[in-house]
Amino acid sequence: MIDAHVALPGRPTVRVRKISPVQTKRGAEQYEREIREAVLAGTWRNTEDERRTPTFAVFAAYFLETYAATNNRPSTVREKRRALGRGLLDELGHLRLDAIGTRGVEAFKARRKQDGVGNKTINEELAILRKILGYAEEIGELNAPSPKIRRLKVQRPGFDFLDFDEARRLVNPLRTTSREVAHEEAVMV
């Protein structure tokens, strides 16, 4: 079996994993050289991988059923499902995993911004996209490296401290309630 990573200038690295037709070490080395030359020449086309690579929508469903359901809380799985439904599946669902590139991700971000969605929400959706693509790469469904996903800048929310009057108004009802509870417990005994 060969597992070749061919770096192309200005393009993503191409990964080819195939079984050598000649089942010897020398045969596999020769086959790898041939594959590398074809990739560099631009004549290599792996139709088997194209047929096998699922669409984003199909793989996202698999991701939710297997990885997310096993490794996340049910509330987190629900949030991931909601985030996918808010725009990721509409925008990228029809694409094969290996067809999702930086240009498509940037177009998705631009469309979400035009729809008035906040940067924090878009970043949450991008984090889910990054996790799905990373998982696909990890288990071998995506032979090319996943695209670089840049997050949007988010302003930190201001932090407001309570002044003394606000603190008193917050604590006084609690003191009254705790005294009433203590009185009721004493009466019960």
Image: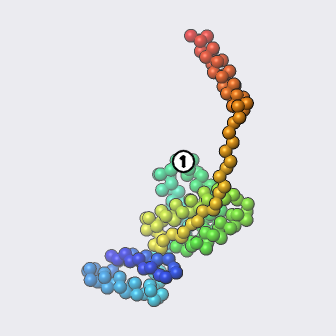
Residue 173 pos. (x, y %): 69, 25
Q: In the depicted view, which residue is nearer to us: 182 or 171?
A: 171
State whether residue 38 is above or below residue 132: below
Residue 78 pos. (x, y %): 58, 51
Which residue does the image show at 70% across and 28% down from the upper left?
168
Q: Tell me how the rendering is colored.
A: rainbow
Which residue does the image show at 54% across and 63% down from the upper left?
130
Which residue does the image show at 63% across and 21% down from the upper left?
178
Question: Which residue does the numbered mark 1 point to in the structure image?
Answer: 74
Please, what secondary structure does the residue beneath circle 1 have? helix
Is residue 40 left or right of 93 when viewed as pictured? left
Image quadrant assignment for residue 113: bottom right
Q: Is residue 97 visible?
A: no
Report the label total: 1
State whether residue 78 is above or below residue 99: above
Is residue 51 left or right of 82 when viewed as pictured? left
Instruction: Name the quarter where the N terminus is drawn.
Output: bottom left
